[in-house]
Amino acid sequence: DGEQEEEEDMSEFNFEDDEDVQNGNIDHPIIAGHNAVAIGFKIYVFGGVEEHGNRHHNEMFVFDTLTKQWSILNCTGDIPCAREGHSMILNDDFSKIYICLGGDSSGFFIDVYEFDVATNKFTQFPASIYEKEYCFPSGCWYSAATYYDKKLYFVGGYCYGHARPPVNAIYSYDLEKQKWVKPIEINLKTSEF
């Protein structure tokens, strides 16, 4: 019965049906394959692809949960190309967002971008530098990712399409050295996930 109570307490927030949500001047497309992080009362959403894969996006949308309004940030710097299936990671003091990897209809990306939340500026980090050969993901998307001790960690995901098995390693990008470091093999069979 406790499980039933939890289900009754859960609710869905539907932007289209909520009369309080204001779109402002934003023509927000229905997208998939995007990613998001929350900082305070704002949700930052980057990338994604429209229905049927017609168009990939590289805008930084922000949803203000207090005013219930969408906006598009006017970003500067090295703006990442349009993509889906990328990782979006917050640093420990919430001042930087990292956008990495992913792909589009032409292929996969091996890139790392830093977004400064205070200035709305993107900076691209060198992504082809590595400690030893083959220690960076060879084009990867839909990885789980996190930030720890000035490094980005990527777990799993797919390389070269869904026809190949998931990545069986944890990859790491050192933000201070600005290079990929040796992966950690996790040696799990796909059926164990």
Image (cartoon, rainbow, N blue to C red):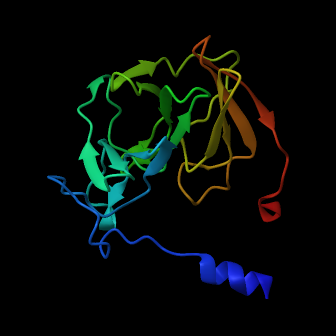
Which residue does the image show at 53% across and 54% down from the upper left? 161
Q: Quadrant of residue 103?
A: top left
In the rendered image, residue 113, in percent from the top left (x then y), is placed at 45, 27
Q: Residue furthest left?
A: 25
User: Which is more toward the observer, 8 or 58?
Assistant: 8
Residue at 42% over, 27% down: 115
Q: Residue 110: horizontal and vertical position, in percent?
A: 50, 32
Say if 79 sits above or below 4 in the image: above
Is residue 165 something one can see in this rendering?
yes
**150 over 68 or under it: above or below:** above
Residue 97 x/y as whole percent = 48, 31
Horizontal arrangement in the rendering, residue 17 relative to residue 45 (left or right) = left
**In the image, 24: left or right of 125?**
left
Quadrant location, the N terminus: bottom right
Which residue is more in the foreground, 152 or 189?
Answer: 152
Look at 67% across and 53% down and name the residue there: 166
